[in-house]
Image (cartoon, rainbow, N blue to C red):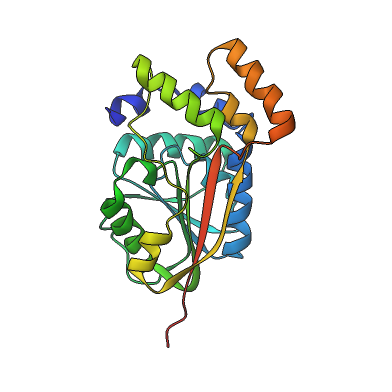
Amino acid sequence: MDWSAFYKSNTASNVTDMLKSPNKWKLILADRVRKLAEGGSVLEAGCGYGVTSLLVGEQTRRVMLDMEPSALEVSQVLFGHAGQHAQYVHGNLFNMPFDDGVFDVVFNAGVLEHFAYEERRNALREMARITRPGGCIIAAVPNHYSTPYAHAYAIEKARGTWKYPDEYLIFDFSREVEEIGGIYSVSRETCDVANSFSFLTDKKTWLWFRLINSFKHYEGYLTICTYRKAWDD
C-alpha cells in the first residue's frame, strides 16, 4: 500500500474533521493510555494521524513515531489545529531511536495486525525495551473474533475492495509475550461493537447483524491488549 499517497491525500480540512466526532474506540483507548501514564511519557509507535494520542491530552508528554514522513506531517496539522504539542520522530517500529526504559506507556492501534508472528514478536520486544520497568505496553488490533467485522473483511477481500493491507487473526499476544519474557498480561478487552457494523456495506446484512446483536452481543471492533513490564530484580 502506498502510505505516502494515502496520507498526502488528506487536506487540512479532512484531518481536522476527525476531531469533530472521533470513533468511540479511540476515546476508550485514549482514556486507557491516559490513566496508565499518570501524567508521564507516552509513545505512539506507528502513530499515523495520531488522533488517539491527541485525545490522551496534554497532561502527558507525547511522542509520535512513524516510518512515513507524510503521516507525521498530517499529525502535526492535527495537533496544531487543536492547539496541542507533541514530539515527532521519523523511525522504524522494529528499531526505534530511543534508550531503554524511557516511556511510561508505549502503544499503537491498527498496526500489529499487518505483521506475521515473528515480526509481531520483534515489534513487541522493541516496544517493551523502551518501556520503563512497571510501565505498560498496549497493542490494539481489529477484532476478527467479532463476527460482523470478520464477515465484512472476508467479503471485501473476496471482492477485491478491501482498502487496507491484509490482516492476521489475533486473539491476543500471549505467545509473543511468553517468548519475549519480562512482561505480563494485564487485560484483554474489546470495545465499540457499533464500529464493526460500519464495515458492512450491504444494508440488509447490516440490519441482520444488528438484529442478531440485540440477542447475541458480539465482541467489539477493537481488541485492546495491555501488558506491564516487570520490575528489575
Residue 152 picture location, percent across and down: 48, 24
- Report if residue 130 is visible in the image: no
**27, 191: nearer the viewer:** 191
- Report if residue 232 is visible in the image: yes
The part of the image, by quadrant, that contains residue 196 is: top right
Q: Vertically, is 177 above or below 198?
A: below
Residue 211 picture location, percent across and down: 71, 22
The part of the image, by quadrant, that contains residue 101 is: bottom left
| Residue drawn at the location 33% of the way across and 63% of the way down | 125
Residue 228 picture location, percent across and down: 50, 68
**133, 220: nearer the viewer:** 220
The quadrant the N terminus occupies is top left
Q: Residue furthest bottom?
A: 233
Q: Vertically, is 203 above or below 171?
A: above
Q: Vertically, is 196 above or below 132?
A: above
Along the horizontal axis of the image, is 27 left or right of 184?
right
The part of the image, by quadrant, that contains residue 111 is: top left
**44, 73: nearer the viewer:** 44
Residue 123 picture location, percent across and down: 32, 56
